[in-house]
Structure formats: C-alpha cells, structure tokens
C-alpha cells in the first residue's frame, strides 16, 4: 500500500473511532450479528414448521442489543387486529398534545356496531362511552366496534401516518406495512370480492352474517341479503374471497416491519413514537392486560415473563405480537403470525409452542450489561 493509502486508512480509522460514540441508534440494521440464542431457536422453529398443517412466521428482536431473528418474517402476512396498536399510539399522542382526554365520551350510534368480541355491542345506541373504556376494550379483548369508534375519533390518515413514522424511526421500510382500514372496511373489502354491492351493507348486516358458522351458509346468506342469485357471485367460496382480499395488502405487512413499530414504541420519546414516557408506559400496561391471547405466545413463556401484547384473529389466520420482559428491563419484541386450518385451536397451540421455543432459546433471560 502506498504512503498516501496508509495515511487515508489512518484518517478513516480515526474518523470511525470518533464517530462510534454517536452512531445512529439503528446501527444493528447494518451489521450481521449472531448470538447464542438464535441457532437453537431456528432449530426449534424448523421442527414446528414440519409438524404444522399450514405456515407461520416469527420475528424476535432483543431491543437491548439489536440482535434479531426472522423466520419467514420478511414475507407478507395478514396482521389482523395488530393494526389496532398504532391507532392506540395515535390516541395517546393526541392525549400528550392536549387534544383529548381519556375521560372524553363518544356517542355510540347504530352505524358503529360491527361483529366481534367485547362489551361495546352490549350497549344501546345513544350510550356515552369514554375513550378510556373504548381503548381498554380495543386492546384487551380486540373489540371491533370500540376500534372503529376510536378510528373515527383520531382518523385513519393520522393512524396510518403514525404507523409509517414508527417503522421509519426504527430504520425500517415503510413500504412493508400495508394500509390500515376500519374494521367495517375489512368486511366491505372482503365481501366485495364476492359481489361489489357488499359496500351497501352496514355493520349490523355483517353481525347477522357472522351468525352463520358454516362458511357455505354464510356466503349463501350474503347473496340472499343482497338479493342476488348465488351464481352472480364472483368467487365460489369464502376461502377464495379472503385469499384475494389478503393479496390487496390492506391491514397486512411483514413481521419485521411490525417489529420495527414495536421497537419504536419501546424506545419511546416524542421524537420517535410521539409519546411521552407516561403515555407509553400506560399503553404498555393496558397491553399487558390483554385477555384474548392466554393460549398463544404467553402460554409458552415462563410465568415470570411480562408480555404487553396484542392479538389478531381472522379467517384461517392468527397473530400475536408484543414486548416481553423478564425481571430486568431488557425488552424483547416478538411478532408471530400463522395461516392454515379453519379451527383456531391448532394456531393457538402452535403459537404456544413458538413461545416455548423462544423461552428455551434464552433470549428472554439475557442480563442487562451495566454501563462502564
């Protein structure tokens, strides 16, 4: 090497050394890091994949070191109700800005009702429900009516912008997260694959259709409700309609992108998630009270693991995603989704086994290195 080359190399090393203390917070996206917990987890996941009559994806990231493992996590998955997390973040951001209060009340109207779990549908039209109640219902039991009311309050555009900003703040690719829609729009878009007049139906119509557990009967009831012959439907099954709907990328994305969103939520600060520390901790505390995922990832974790998470369930698809912590404040982001059998039970058993595999890998038990 020439003298000039040696001098240039020396200057570069000095520059890198000086820069090391102020490297971008997302440095881990630009290095290939492997840790002891990753290989055993990959081995366990490979075994689970062989036995599951479907497919699944997992993304795990140690938010202390940045080390991550993606198992089919860069594929597109239907995220279902995981999209309610950025809606909640947008709500808390408005709270921090003084634009609303959790004690504020919204009036439940007949047009708000949509099928799904939760207590909101048990209230009469005209009921005045607090944002606090709606938020708790949306996150802990995945109440769709409560979700659409909160989306009406904060806006879809703002919720989508918040989601993209959170992915970008972690150094992720915003194009890997699909557009968020209302839960009523999910029904409109899905059933429109069968017949365009589906958009004329209201939430109460979809509640009635949901009473048909048999999918062939549900499709027949849909045609009858529209007053069209079954032969005029564009597709011959509910399965086919959902596959086409999922391909639209609405309410979907990669598990890596959603992991980026969770990373931003945990790392906090108004410059990233847009939330104050108090709002972030309140939101995570509510997510820790989630009751809809007791048989999923949480069932495989140790009893001493705190899991602030959100679940998602749709036709032949389930998800579970959140922040896991054991003892010390070393958070681990976990995102998992499945696609396969009609019955939810096999999906939940698989997610519990994924949780057990993550537990056995040791990633949830890593110590926090004290600063020198």
Image (cartoon, grey):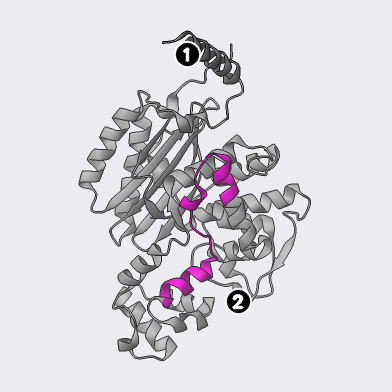
Residue name at image x 45 percent, y 34 percent: 61
Residue 257 - label: none
As drawn, the residue found furthest toward the left would be 50
The answer to whether residue 287 shows anywhere in this view is yes
> Which region shows up in magenta?
164-192
Mark 1 or mark 2, earlier in chain: 1
Q: Magenta span has 65?
A: no
Residue 214: horizontal and vertical position, in percent? 31, 74
Disc 2: which residue: 111
As drawn, the residue found furthest toward the top would be 3
Q: Quadrant of the N terminus?
A: top left
Q: Quadrant of residue 154?
A: bottom right
Disc 1: which residue: 5
Q: How many marks?
A: 2
Tag 1 near tag 2, CB within 8 Å:
no
Q: Magenta span has 189?
A: yes
Callout 2: 10 Å neighbours few (<14), some, many (20+)?
A: few
Q: Quadrant of residue 157?
A: bottom right
Residue 367: horizontal and vertical position, in percent? 48, 20
Residue 107: horizontal and vertical position, in percent? 70, 70
Q: Is residue 59 above or below residue 364?
A: below
Callout 1: 10 Å neighbours few (<14), some, many (20+)?
A: few
Residue name at image x 47 percent, y 62 percent: 250
Element under disc 1: helix
Q: Is residue 46 above or below residue 116?
A: above
Element under disc 2: helix
Q: Quadrant of the C terminus?
A: top right
Report the side of 44 relative to 185 (left or right): left
Q: Which mark's residue is nearer the viewer, 1 or 2?
A: 1
Residue 369: horizontal and vertical position, in percent? 52, 17
Q: CA distance from mark 1 to mark 2?
A: 72 Å
């Amino acid at each position: 090497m020439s003298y000039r080359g040696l001098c240039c190399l020396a200057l570069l090393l000095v520059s890198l050394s000086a820069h090391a203390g102020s490297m971008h917070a997302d440095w881990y996206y630009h290095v290939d890091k492997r840790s002891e917990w990753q290989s055993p987890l990959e081995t366990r996941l490979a075994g689970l994949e062989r036995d599951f009559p479907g497919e699944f994806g997992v993304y795990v990231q140690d938010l202390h070191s940045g080390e991550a493992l993606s198992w089919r996590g860069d594929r597109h998955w239907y995220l279902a109700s995981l999209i309610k997390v950025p809606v909640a973040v947008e709500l808390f951001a408005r709270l921090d800005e003084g634009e609303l209060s959790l004690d504020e009340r919204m009036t439940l109207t007949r047009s708000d009702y949509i099928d799904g779990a939760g207590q909101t549908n048990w209230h009469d039209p005209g009921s005045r429900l607090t944002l606090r109640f709606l938020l708790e219902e949306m996150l802990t039991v995945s109440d769709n009516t409560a979700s659409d009311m909160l989306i009406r309050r904060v806006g879809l555009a703002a919720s989508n912008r918040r989601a993209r900003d959170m992915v970008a703040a972690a150094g992720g690719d915003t194009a890997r997260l699909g557009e968020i829609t209302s839960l009523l729009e999910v029904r409109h878009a899905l059933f429109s694959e069968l017949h365009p007049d589906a958009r004329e139906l209201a939430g109460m119509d979809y509640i009635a259709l949901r009473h048909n557990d048999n999918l062939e009967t549900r499709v027949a009831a849909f045609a009858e409700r529209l007053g069209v012959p079954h032969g005029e439907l564009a597709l011959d099954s509910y399965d086919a309609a959902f596959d086409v709907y999922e391909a639209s990328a609405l309410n979907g994305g990669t598990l890596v992108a959603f992991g980026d969103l969770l990373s931003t939520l945990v790392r906090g600060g108004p410059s990233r998630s847009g939330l104050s520390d108090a709002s972030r901790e309140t939101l995570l505390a509510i997510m820790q009270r989630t009751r809809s995922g007791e048989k999923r990832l949480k069932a495989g974790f140790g009893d001493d693991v705190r899991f602030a998470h959100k679940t998602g369930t749709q036709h032949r698809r389930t998800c579970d995603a959140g922040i896991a912590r054991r003892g010390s404040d070393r958070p681990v982001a976990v995102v998992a989704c499945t696609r396969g059998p009609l019955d939810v039970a096999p999906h939940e058993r698989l997610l519990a086994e994924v949780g057990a595999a993550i537990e056995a890998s040791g990633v949830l038990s890593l110590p926090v290195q004290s600063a020198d």
